């Protein structure tokens, strides 16, 4: 089973709202990722967690705050977003950060008004 | 820095026929992985095939196969007996096999949109 789940599927929020995206995997993977994907573009890496520790932050604005409560769960907390943050947010996981294949979730489509 | 280039923004194939998607990459490393991911309109990125650079044999997964030319830094995807469900955006991706820094991250090409005609 290579399933990564993400909730919600769609999210509309105002610029003053606080919301969270959730990602979950039960494959025993120890690395989890957040990507941002704009229309007709490849995914862009935002954060990497390896063994529940933040390993990579690709200079993402502080209005995006990741959290890894345990090895199966990854959250992305959103606050004071801008309309240009509207995108598809993809979560992925892999057995190991470097050596193993990343498996993606279905994504959350975010619209910031 | 490594780069991945997909020179075909769009491709079209007739159902049941064969199509090849191109991908070239640039790296100074000798050990790495290459991937093809498929992203249909449903949005989920699905792994199609993976190739380890140290393996000379080309990877195959059912109707999908690659032509991996390490010296030429080329990694093309062949889809045989194309089906309507193969219509999607296809991304080629590179990842270093070395630990440390950001070398575990996927580097994507810009994608090729494949249409399948009935």
Image: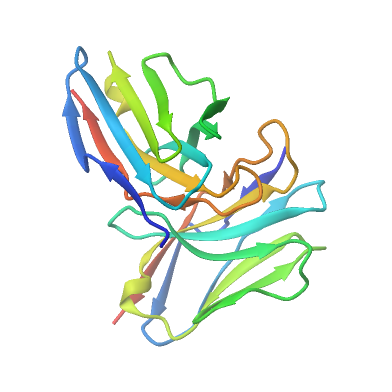
x%, y% of residue B110?
51, 49
Name the residue: 35% across, 75% down: B116
Query: Do we see residue A42 in this rendering?
Result: no
The color scheme shown is rainbow
> Is residue A53 or residue B24 the one in the foreground?
A53
x%, y% of residue B78?
55, 76
Residue B94 vertical position relative to residue A38 in the rendered view, above or below? below
Q: So how many labels did they put on this image?
A: 0
In the image, taking residue B115 as reference, residue B26 lies left or right, namely right
In the image, taking residue B100 as reference, residue B66 lies left or right, namely left
x%, y% of residue B10?
44, 61
Name the residue: 45% across, 45% down: A92
Residue A75 vertical position relative to residue B53 in the rendered view, above or below? above
x%, y% of residue A1?
41, 62
Give the quarter of the image for residue B67.
Answer: bottom right
In the image, taking residue A86 as reference, residue B25 lies left or right, namely right
In the image, taking residue A43 as reference, residue B2 lies left or right, namely right
> Is residue A42 or residue A108 the one in the foreground?
A108
Query: Do we see residue A44 in this rendering?
Result: yes
Name the residue: 32% across, 44% down: A107
Placement of the C terminus of chain B among the 4 image quadrants: bottom left
Name the residue: 43% across, 29% down: A68
Placement of the N terminus of chain B among the 4 image quadrants: top right
Give the quarter of the image for residue A8.
Answer: top left
């Amino acid at each position: 089973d290579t399933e990564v789940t993400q909730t919600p599927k769609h999210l509309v929020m105002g610029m003053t709202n606080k919301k969270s995206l959730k990602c979950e995997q039960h494959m025993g993977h120890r690395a989890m990722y957040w990507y941002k994907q704009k229309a007709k573009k490849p995914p862009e890496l935002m954060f990497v967690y390896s063994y529940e520790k933040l390993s990579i932050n690709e200079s993402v604005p502080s209005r995006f705050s990741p959290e890894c409560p345990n090895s199966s769960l990854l959250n992305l907390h959103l606050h004071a977003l801008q309309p240009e943050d509207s995108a598809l947010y993809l979560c992925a996981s892999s057995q190991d950060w470097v050596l193993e294949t990343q498996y993606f979730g279905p994504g959350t489509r975010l619209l910031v008004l | 820095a490594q780069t991945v280039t997909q020179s075909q923004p769009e491709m079209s194939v007739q159902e049941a026929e064969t199509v090849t998607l191109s991908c070239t990459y640039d790296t100074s490393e000798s050990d790495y992985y290459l991937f093809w991911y498929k992203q249909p309109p449903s949005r989920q990125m699905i792994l199609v095939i993976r190739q380890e650079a140290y393996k000379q044999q080309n990877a195959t997964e059912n109707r999908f196969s690659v032509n991996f030319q390490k010296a030429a830094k080329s990694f093309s995807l062949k889809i045989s007996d194309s089906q309507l469900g193969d219509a999607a955006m296809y991304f080629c991706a590179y990842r270093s096999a070395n630990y440390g820094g950001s070398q575990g991250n996927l580097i994507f090409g810009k994608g090729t949109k494949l249409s399948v005609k009935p």
